[in-house]
Image (cartoon, grey):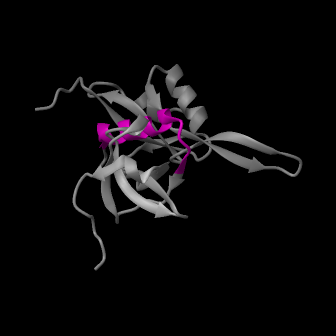
Amino acid sequence: MEDPTKQRWYAVETKTRLEQTVESLLRNKGYETFLPLYKVRRQWSDRIKLLDAALFPGYLFSRLGGGQRTLPLLTTPFVRGIVSSGGRPLPVPEEEVEAVRAIVASGLPATPWPYLQEGDRVRIRHGSLAGVEGLLLSFKKQHRLVVSIDMLHRSVAVEIDIAWVEPAGPPMNRPS
């Protein structure tokens, strides 16, 4: 039986482009949050600006314990809910959140990526992402590691050196 006091990560759905506002509001209410961001260039008529944007638009992560009340979280402005199934919040696997944290902390250029179900599962052997697992993808002659948050059907990609990877499992859903 699981410890009901153990804190787990949950995906909080927010109004898109208001993730940073929601994160601030939740932190002020005492919730532990994680909002993975990346740099994006936006062009206006007179200038180009580098901004922070959410890697998973419309979502952030919050750590909740079994006995922790969710009503203050759910009544926070711009929060749409906690990702659930059958009315029960679904915890996000710790290793998926930690993989995204490692990518953000690595300083390597990361970008949102379409959710993928095909490709080879790989593990990074060297560098700041050592131990992180994901899908290997080749895009514009560059290799990328794609890490997914399955329950959100969202992914993030980071450029890697092919020499850093080793197989981590059998190929998934590869067409013949």
Q: Residue at x 53, y 20 (%)?
A: 28
Placement of the N terminus among the 4 image quadrants: top left
Task: In the rendered view, tell whether residue 79 sits above or below residue 141.
Answer: above
Q: Can the viewer see residue 130 in this picture?
A: yes
Q: Residue at x 56, y 44 (%)?
A: 109
Q: Is residue 96 magenta?
A: yes
Displayed quadrant of residue 23: top right
Looking at this rendering, what residue extends furthest in the left direction? Answer: 1
Q: Pick the residue in front: 105 or 84.
A: 105
Task: In the rendered view, tell whether residue 65 sits above or below residue 37.
Answer: above
For the record, the magenta segment spans 90-111
Q: Is residue 60 left or right of residue 171?
A: right
Q: Can the viewer see residue 10 in this picture?
A: no
Looking at this rendering, what residue extends furthest in the front direction? Answer: 163
Q: Where residue 102 sits in the image (x, y, percent)?
A: 42, 35
Task: In the rendered view, tell whether residue 53 sits above or below residue 85.
Answer: above
Task: In the rendered view, tell whether residue 104 sits above or below residue 25.
Answer: below
Q: Where residue 89 sits in the image (x, y, percent)?
A: 32, 42
Q: Where residue 98 sits in the image (x, y, percent)?
A: 36, 36
Q: Pick the residue in front: 162 or 169.
A: 162
Q: Where residue 159 sits in the image (x, y, percent)?
A: 50, 50
Displayed quadrant of residue 71: top left
